[in-house]
Image (cartoon, rainbow, N blue to C red):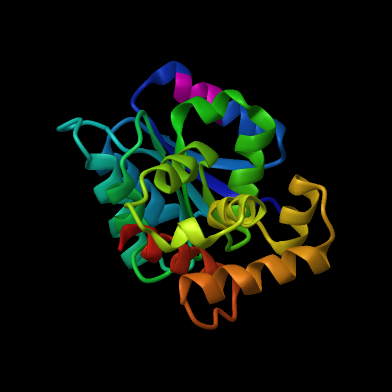
Amino acid sequence: MKARIVIGEDDVLLREGIARILAEAGFEVAAQAGDAEDLLRKALAHKPDVTVVDVQMPPDRTDDGLRAALELRRRLPGSGVLVLSQFYEKQYAMDLIGDRAEGVGYLLKERVGDVDAFVEAVQRVAAGGSALDPEIVGRMLGRRAADSPVDRLSPRERDVLGSMAEGKSNQGIAQALFITEAAVEKHVTNIFHKLELGPTPTEHRRVRAVLAYLDH
């Protein structure tokens, strides 16, 4: 069964481009909207597997799209949301994730141009996973405070931490870093020990723990 998608983007060309990319990847594009209010109505009506939404949309063109996404997260907890942003804003990611990282994504708009990565992110969110832009994760890690516990990590552990924050599974991390899953498990155990984050029984909670740590 095809995953159903609703798209919210006020740039008509980009909206049509996203719709075409997703349709060709096998998704069902159920509806499109050019402003936040129309997006909210259509998403609530269609109850999609994923709503792809731009942060800045009419009527105010500030964070209307993000606020619509937060409302969808509240009213359709079983539906995924993938937010696209023109620029990096850590607080947007934190607001969107809230207390649960299941079915949520936050990507820079430029990532849409990388069709395979964009489609993979939508698939991950549709399946109840998470997808954070690698650039955003990198900037978060780069802005750590002096004497941060991140400094205790080895270079390889930082690579694993970055992949974890993007939402990758242990298998995905192993493939991305060309190491074994056993090595990934060992690195993950070391990371949480060094960061004093405690046990994290699911991958989604791992992402939440990483972001909570970075925010702190």
Give the total number of marks visible in the rendering: 0
- Asked whether, in this view, residue 113 is left or right of residue 180, the answer is left
Q: Position of residue 140 (x, y in %)?
A: 40, 46
48 left or right, relative to 116:
left
Quarter of the image for the C terminus: give it: bottom left
- Percent of width and height locating residue 12: 41, 19
For the record, the magenta segment spans 14-18
Along the viewing direction, whichever of 132 and 188 lies nearer the viewer = 188
- For image coordinates 28% across by 58% down, the residue present is 71
Looking at the image, which residue is at 34% across and 42% down? 39
Q: Is residue 152 in view? A: yes
Magenta-colored stretch includes residue 192: no
Q: Quadrant of the N terminus?
A: bottom right
Write down the quadrant of residue 75 in the picture.
Answer: bottom left
Q: Is residue 177 above or below residue 112?
A: below
Task: Say which residue appears at 47% left-offset and 56% top-offset.
Answer: 151
Q: Between 129 and 53, which is closer to the camera in this rendering?
A: 129
Question: Which residue extends farthest top?
Answer: 13
Residue at the image point whose x is 64% and y is 55% from the top = 160
Q: Which residue appears farthest toward the left when viewing the image?
A: 60
Residue 208 position, x and y percent, is: 45, 66
Nearer-the-camera pick, 170 or 5: 170
Q: Position of residue 108 (x, y in %)?
A: 45, 33
145 to the left or right of 21: left
Residue 205 seen in the current view:
no
Dominant SS in magenta: helix
